[in-house]
Each structure stands twice: as structure tokens, then as C-alpha cells.
Image (cartoon, rainbow, N blue to C red):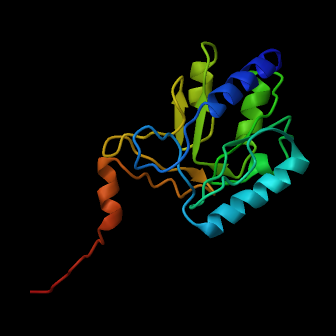
Amino acid sequence: MEKVYDQVLDLVVQKTKALKLGDVSDPGVQMGSVIDEKQMQKVLDYIKLGRREGRLVTGGEKLVGDGFLIQPTIFADVSPKAKIAREEIFGPVLSVLKAPDFDGALQMANDSEYGLTGAYFGKANLKRAAEEFYVGNLYLNRKCTGAMVGAHPFGGFDMSGTNAKAGGRDYLRLFLEAKVVAEKI
């Protein structure tokens, strides 16, 4: 994995810089703003922290204008123990970590108190990823996230949920209250 780190990082940065940002009511826009000013400030605080914990590769600023639009931000050379690598930011911030091999990458991924979603791209180790990557939703060789509503259950492990999945047919039970009535006749 170390041998392709720079190549993958360059490709991710290139794709990120090509994203069209703005008002999501425009069908050509690929990324909109965060939900509100409070979330924007939280993300900007993580970006400020990221400047100390990693190497800023692209982004890192609020875009000028109305709304809460933040540039997609990528930090490279991030330690597995860095806050920006370990916490759920819920904003356009990506931490890129270097793993020596598949075992090292799996160890880093599983060494988290969160486990909502994970993804693995590759030809080798697909079965191991499916068995050993500890997340509620694992995507193999496809984009990370994008559960099919009504068909694909969605929910996480550990601090990313209680493992109750949303989106599948079993999810309906979470909206029901069981009631038992006993009567002696």
C-alpha cells in the first residue's frame, strides 16, 4: 500500500479539484454546503486542527458567499492517532493515511471507536475485507456510502450506531411499539 500512496493521493486530489460546488438545486453541482453555521464552524475547527496534524494538500477554506460551503479538504501524511483521522467530522474533510500493507490498513481501520461505513478497493483480500473489516456497511470496489433506500439496510457498529439498520424492510419495526394485552376471561 505504501508503494501506491502518492499515486492514489494524486488521483484523489485531482478528482476533488474537479468537483463542482454550489447550490444542489443545480443538477450539475456535485457538492453542496454543510447544514448550518454551527456545523460549518465545527468543520472549520477540524480543518484548523488538521493543519497541525497533517499536510494540507487541497481545500481548507470556506467559500465566499451565502451559505455554508466549505472547500473539499484533503490532508495527507496523517497519523493513525490524529483526531482528524479518528473522529466523525461530517464535513468535506479527508485524512489520507499510509499503511505498509493490507494487514496494516485493516488494523488502522479497525482501531476506531466508530464503525459506520468502510470501503475497500482491490482484487486481493476481498474475502478477508468482508470478514475482518469491522463496520456496519462495507462497500467493496464501489463508492463508499450510497445505500439504496428501501433495499439496503444502513447502520453502524460501536459509537456509530446501535447496529439497528435503517432502509431495509426490517427497519419498519423500529417505528412500532410492541404491546401485549392479557385478559382473564
- Examine the rendered structure and indicate whether residue 19 appears above or below residue 10: below
> Would you place residue 134 above or below residue 32 in this image?
above
Which quadrant: the C terminus? bottom left
Task: Please tell me which residue lies in front, 54 or 171.
Answer: 54
Task: Looking at this view, name the residue that lies furthest to the right.
Answer: 52
Residue sitting farthest toward the front: 65
Position of residue 37 in the picture relative to residue 176 (left or right)? right
Instruction: Locate residue 108 relative to residue 34 in the image: left or right.
Output: right
Q: Position of residue 94 (x, y in %)?
A: 71, 41
Q: Residue at x 48, y 41 (%)?
A: 29
Does the rendering let one see residue 112? Answer: yes
Q: Residue at x 30, y 72 (%)?
A: 177
- Quarter of the figure that contains the N terminus: top right
Q: Residue at x 72, y 53 (%)?
A: 87
| Residue 166, percent from left and from top | 40, 53
Q: Is residue 141 left or right of residue 42?
A: left
The residue closer to the viewer here, 66 or 32, is: 66
Total marks in image: 0
Q: Nearer the viewer, residue 92 or 131?
A: 92
- Residue at 57% across / 47% down in the picture? 116
- Quick check: 154 above or below 11? below
- The x, y position of residue 179, in whole percent, is 26, 75
Q: Is residue 1 visible?
A: no
Which residue, as the protein is rendered here, is positioned at the far left?
Answer: 185
Quadrant of res 133:
top right
| Residue 18, picture quadrant | top right
Q: Position of residue 143 (x, y in %)?
A: 52, 31
